[in-house]
Amino acid sequence: MRTARRASTMEVPSFLRQLVKETEKMVTFFFKGGRREDYDFENEEDNPSPYLDRPILAKDMEEGGSKWGVNYGMASVQGWRVQMEDAHTCMPEMSGGLPSWSYFAVFDGHAGRTVAQYCAKHLLDFILDKGCVMADEDPDQVKDGIRNGFLGIDRHMHTLARNENWDHSGSTATAVMISPRNIYFINCGDSRTFLCRNGQVVFYTEDHKPCNPREKERIQNAGGSVTLQRINGSLAVSRALGDYDFKEVELKTQTEQLVSPEPEVYELRRTPEDEFLVVACDGVWDAVGNEELCAFVRNRLQVCDDLRDICAQVIDLCLYKGSLDNISIIIICFDSAPKVTPEALQREAALEQIIEQKVEKIIQMMRAKDEDPDLLYVMKFLASEEIPGLPPGGGIISKKDCIIAAYQKYAAAIRSIEAMDTVGSEDSN
Ligand code: MN
């Protein structure tokens, strides 16, 4: 796969920032109310903010697979946030006498990272510890084991948090456990997992938001309220591990508290048409929808065989669409996932050629008017054009590497021609 990402490391941060400023109003809609309310880009010194001046774009990436044909790629980025609070676990081969089982999880921490990191390390142990997950699989028992593992680790961390003076953090969790027969979808909070089967999103986990009628009822029964779509006006997620400040209501059980650590677990029978799973935090879902992302990943799988690179492309897409959060994504492929084809590669090469030609024309047009074509202008110009064959769900933004490479090439070429002209005219004087 041809990629020009490296070439543009100098240009991207300031460009990104401009773009984020430009789209700020548009994207505010996506953010959980309040998080950005007191933030003023122009007045950073006066307002301590949870956002950085420049995003940290270095990606953590990993990949791997199992003997039984489950392959995965993972990428995460800190982005605009002051801290990286996401964590993850990738176990293509689960140990513990469970041949052909896999487990993948994303934890999105808030108000600190202690709980997310502890869960990434230990949640699976708590699930397996109960002995309900066995090679001779009984789905109801597996689901009980997962549920009890969540409640168990949450009680355990409650004690640790008290005794070891932890931060006041909490974490969402979304995970999949894959057995030879079934996929178990696990969710607690507003991260999300979906399955693409036969080109369609056939299952996705439900986000746990305080406004959700069932969640609201529990919150009110625990003496709380939902204002500004938040629990008591402060927490934007209604289920999570940790968050012990919201779990001290007397005479209420662990699953009746303002914030519940109880996961929802669904099992789905595996089929030969299962293509891939996406497990990701809301840094992704705030920027793209399930169907969009499904189409984009399918399209990328046909031109790129490195799952890490596809995860990285999704992250870039989300950043350019305005996501200001930490971003983590795992893509897990089964045998039926789309594969790289010569036809798709040819289409992609043709598309990149069209884009390159358009960039050249825009730059020439601008120079003819004696204006300096900056990258943002070029990008906006292209966004307003009708360009057939762009990746579905990704659009022109997903071809930014190609645009940046072409921009640098032609901008540099034009500058050197102009420099030669200047030298030439000086000579003739
Ligand atoms: Mn998040």
Image (cartoon, rainbow, N blue to C red):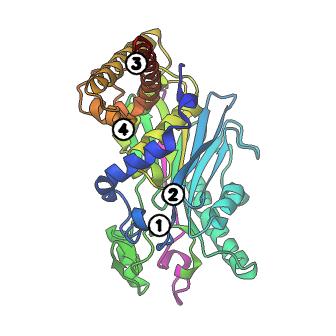
The residue furthest bottom is 250
User: In whole angstroms, how far apart are the C-alphas of marks 3 and 1?
Assistant: 39 Å
Provide residue 20's location: percent of width, then percent of height.
39, 50
Mark closest to the chain's N terminus, 4 or 2: 2
Residue at the location (50% across, 19% down)?
339
| The furthest residue to the front | 429
CA distance for labels 4 and 3: 18 Å
Residue annotated with mark 1: 44
Element carrying mark 3: helix
Looking at the image, residue 101 lies above or below residue 210: above
CB under 8 Å between discs 1 and 2: yes
In this rendering, the label closer to the viewer, 4 or 3: 4
Q: Badge 1, how many Cα within 10 Å: few under 14, some, many 20+?
A: few
Mark 3 / mark 2, whichever is N-terminal: 2
Depicted 206 relative to depicted 268: above or below: below
Which circle's residue, 1 or 2, is located before the other in the chain?
1
- Say few, some or many: other residues with alpha carbon within 10 Å of mark 4 (under 14 / 14 to 19 / 20 or more): some
Q: Which mark is residue 150?
A: none
Which residue position is annotated with label 3?
A: 352
Q: CA distance from mark 4 to mark 2?
A: 19 Å
- Amino acid bearing label 2: Asp
Start and end of the magenta stretch? 246-273
Badge 3 crowding class, 10 Å Cα cut-off, few under 14, some 14 to 19, many 20 or more, is some
x and y, in percent, of residue 49 in the image: 49, 68
**Numbered badge on residue 376:** 4
Query: Real-space Cα distance between discs 4 and 1?
Result: 23 Å
Q: Is residue 332 left or right of residue 122?
A: left
What is the quadrant of residue 367 in the picture? Answer: top left
